[in-house]
């Protein structure tokens, strides 16, 4: 198998299952736009999850990105028409610069939420601590579709840096979006605030988690937690119904609480918001689903590792057909696991993935043995070449300098004195 074949297999295995095996239950298409530091993190979470199919759009001038480059990314990846936009089920705006989107694009997103039920989430309250960026967001028609009152936020001291603690709302009237995570490591944690702004709920907004700290304000939202106190408790995450769509606001940016180093369940909670917004069933056993998502992620890494070995071995002419055939067989099993996952049959999906990971591990071991065998012949040839050159050089040195068989003394020529 040649490099081109390896690339084709890699592309096929990375495509969404519906594109490879035909029309079946499809993952939700998601627009992920915003800060070039946050977007790769969240898109990696979504790419590893069979439920989601992200499209990434950098939309914040940062880390060397110019506005010209951002406008180009928007031209390339933002849906060209309203009909194309409606192919998406959800959008994530990660502390973006709203000016990167043209006013008509902002209105398209607004209409898609209000009229056609597009779900959405935006982070860092008013997107930034910069007054220019936060004011631009508050003045955008799109901010009207989200539960945070951006106009009120920018009229007060809305920046925050200090100790905070996340508390999940236990009010029985609040949907069980985050309640299953109560008691799990990191789901309710204390740390120094990271990328946090003040968030103020609009009437009708439901607070799902609170940020508790030495705030000068307190905002309970609809259906407040029985432990709510003011001041000191403000919304950390909240949602509301806007027209036909459900949208979310996060007080903080990706990092801090949303860092898997603090909260290993951060990706699961972000996906839970999407599921709720789209009216999909939330998992009852969030732990088994968490570990199942980890298995999909581990499989993707193992698959790339084996493919890289196959590519390496193929360069030396080794026969890798058995490995590539095994990869195709395993991909069929993983497809079944993905379909079970999309159909909410998590236990069956988990068993399939366990088997796929075991078989992938066996293929990895086989690929390593092939690599070692191929390299062995290279080492033998190199050893023979070096040893042969050394023997020839040694023999020549011994013949000329030690035995002196070919040595002949040079006679001395003197100038005659009579000359």
Image: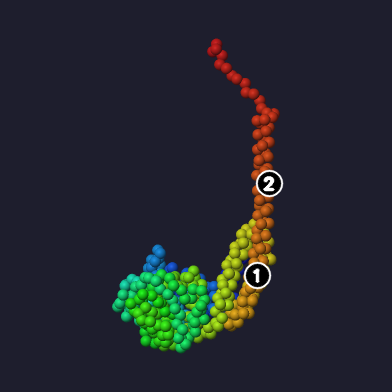
- Residue 370 position in % (x across, y down): 67, 60
Q: Does 385 appear above or below 301? A: above
N-term-proximal mark, 2 vs 1 = 1
Circle number at residue 214: none
Q: How many marks?
A: 2
Residue 120: in sight, yes or no?
A: no
Give the residue drawn at x 48%, y 76%.
187
Residue bearing mark 1: 358
Q: In which quarter of the image is the C terminus?
A: top right
- Residue 387's image quarter? top right
Compare residues 238 and 408 and report the one nearer the observer: 238
- Left/right placement of residue 66 relative to residue 88 reads left
- Residue matched to label 2: 384
Instruction: Please indicate whether residue 156 sits to the left or right of residue 56 in the image.
Output: left
Looking at the image, residue 182 sits to the left or right of residue 394; the answer is left
Q: Where is residue 69, by image quadrant? A: bottom left
Residue nearest the observer in this picture, 286 or 250: 286
**Residue 302 in the image, given as x and y percentages of width and height:** 60, 67
């Amino acid at each position: 198998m040649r490099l081109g074949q390896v690339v084709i297999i890699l592309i096929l295995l990375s495509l969404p299952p519906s594109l490879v095996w035909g029309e079946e239950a499809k993952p939700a298409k998601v627009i992920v736009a915003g800060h070039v530091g946050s977007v790769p993190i969240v898109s990696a979470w979504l790419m590893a999850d069979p439920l989601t199919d992200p499209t990434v759009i950098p939309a914040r001038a940062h880390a060397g990105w110019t506005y010209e480059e951002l406008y180009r990314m928007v031209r390339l990846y933002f849906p060209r028409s309203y009909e194309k936009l409606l192919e998406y089920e959800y959008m994530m705006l990660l502390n973006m610069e709203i000016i990167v989107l043209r006013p008509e694009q902002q209105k398209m997103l607004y209409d898609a939420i209000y009229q056609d039920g597009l779900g959405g989430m935006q982070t860092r309250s008013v997107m930034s601590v910069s007054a220019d960026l936060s004011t631009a967001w508050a003045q955008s028609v799109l901010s009207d579709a989200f539960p945070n009152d951006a106009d009120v936020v920018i009229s007060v001291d809305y920046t925050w840096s200090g100790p905070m603690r996340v508390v999940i709302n236990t009010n029985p009237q609040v949907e069980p979006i985050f309640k299953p995570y109560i008691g799990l490591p990191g789901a309710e944690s204390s740390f120094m605030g990271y990328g946090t702004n003040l968030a103020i709920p609009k009437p009708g907004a439901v607070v799902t988690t609170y940020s508790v700290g030495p705030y000068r304000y307190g905002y309970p939202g609809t259906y407040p937690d029985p432990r709510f106190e003011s001041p000191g408790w403000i919304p950390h995450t909240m949602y509301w119904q806007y027209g036909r769509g459900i949208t979310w606001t996060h007080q903080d940016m990706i990092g801090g609480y949303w860092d898997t180093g603090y909260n290993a369940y951060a990706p699961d909670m972000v996906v839970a918001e999407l599921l709720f917004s789209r009216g999909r069933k939330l998992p009852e056993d969030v732990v088994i689903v968490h570990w199942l998502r980890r298995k999909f992620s581990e499989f993707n890494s193992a698959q790339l590792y084996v493919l890289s070995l196959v590519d390496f071995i193929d360069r030396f002419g080794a026969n890798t057909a058995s490995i590539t055939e095994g990869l195709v067989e395993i991909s069929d099993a993983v497809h079944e696991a993905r379909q079970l996952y999309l159909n909410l049959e998590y236990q069956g999906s988990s068993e399939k993935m366990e088997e796929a990971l075991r078989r992938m591990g066996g293929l990895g071991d086989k690929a390593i043995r092939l690599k070692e065998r191929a390299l062995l012949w290279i080492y033998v040839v190199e050893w023979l070449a070096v040893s042969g050159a050394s023997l020839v050089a040694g023999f020549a040195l011994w013949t000329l300098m030690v035995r002196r068989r070919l040595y002949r003394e040079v006679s001395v020529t003197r100038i005659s004195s009579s000359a």
